[in-house]
Amino acid sequence: MPPTPSAALLRHSATALLRRSPHQAPPPHALRLPRALTSAFHSSPAPRLPVVPAAEKQLQRPIVVNLPSGEEKELDHCHCSECVNQDTLQRSFDSFTNTDKTPQNVTSKEDGLEVIWQETGHKSFFPWEWLATNIQKKPSTPKYAFWGAEIADSPPAVHYDEVMASDAGVGKWTAKIREHGFCFVDGCPVSPEKTEELLNRIAFIRETHYGAFYDFTSDLTMKDTAYTTLALPAHTDTTYFTDPSGLQLFHLLSHHGTGGASLLVDGFACASQLRTQDPRAYDILSRVPVPWHASGNEGVVITPATWVPVFTLDGEGGVRQLRWNNDDRASMPVETQGVGYEEWFEAARVWNKVITDRKNEYWEQLVPGRPVIFDNWRVMHARSAFEGKRRMCGGYINRDDFISRYWNTNFSREEVLKRII
């Protein structure tokens, strides 16, 4: 993929094109800049609102600007106050009516490209910086730091006081979670109330059939193996939700007994290893949907809106979301997506071998005053069997709320909006 052109190069290329004769055909490789406008303002599910006068009878029509890279692009859209509500940052016109409109005048200026539209005289302005950013616009790919057992030498951590004192502290915390998939919090008061306050520094706690903030012992109050003293294999939680929980936090409040070491496994690192070692297994686990479910509690049966594979991929073929809990898997069909059950099971067996490789296992004994939070879309957790009475508290946070908090505590609002809008 060619590099994104700078604002200066865009300005130069636009100026060169605008010197061409109006009857001369545009070059074969060009940037197309559309303006999407409308005859009326819509905001579903609200009723049809009055016409926006300045945007009346206008819609999308590209203009052509030669790019230094020789590419042709179509970009959306005019951001002026008549086309985008400046309070809500939502488009205030219908993009799909009156498509036969044309630009009347295009002017290359020092700070951007100005377009005047023939039908109404509406003026659109596209800053060079915005154009440079949006030419190659695509969903951002986070820079993950993969890890294995060696992370035990220096696991990511922040201090409770730092997180509670300022949004800068929250930014440091969420950045570590984003990069590594987990983070410890040192110096946390050994109290469920203070732990709940800590979680709320990121976002509100997600309520599920387990409740909201949880404070539990191994008494099988809920019919789930997590509420026993048994060992648990590496897994992600809430595989059976259409939208699995984004973050999960555990704080060991007390343990009068032995055992119960906690395990963390970087699922994205393991998936990358599987992709290299056995591409066929990786492909199967990213295509074949799995019937996840939660049915142990009377009156509760939960499955996703549609069956979902173990791996949900991003646009680059890497894993964006991991769902893995073999205990929550219902019976697989004999064949699906052209893959038989035995072939799926063999792929899952190879996957299980990767995630149980000692080089990928990070074991840590949790202690009171040091909660751990992890990305449930990436990091699997487990525990060894234990004896005695153990009290644990914690909760879930939605993925979208976590990412929003990460963006807004690590970047200015202007930077965030440049990436998003």
Image (cartoon, rainbow, N blue to C red):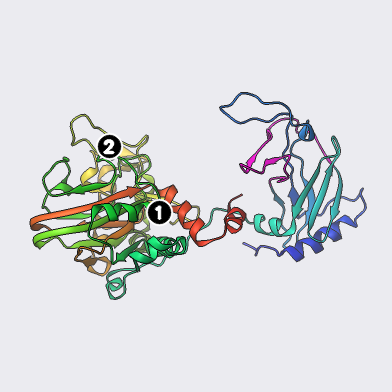
Check disc 2 and give the amino acid type.
Pro
Mark drawn on residue 202: 1
* Most distant residue in the bottom direction: 153
Q: Residues within 10 Å of mark 2 (few under 14, many from 20)?
A: few
Magenta extent: 76-103
Placement of the N terminus among the 4 image quadrants: bottom right
What's the residue at 69%, 56% (across, down)? 130
Mark drawn on residue 343: none
Query: x, y percentage for residue 55?
Result: 76, 35
The relative height of residue 379 versus residue 120 in the rendered view (above or below) is below
Q: Under tag 1, what secondary structure? A: loop
Q: Under tag 2, what secondary structure? A: loop
For residue 140, say whether it is visible.
yes
Give the image quarter of residue 329.
Answer: top left
* Most distant residue in the top direction: 47
Instruction: Between label 1 and label 2, give the one nearer the viewer.
Output: 1
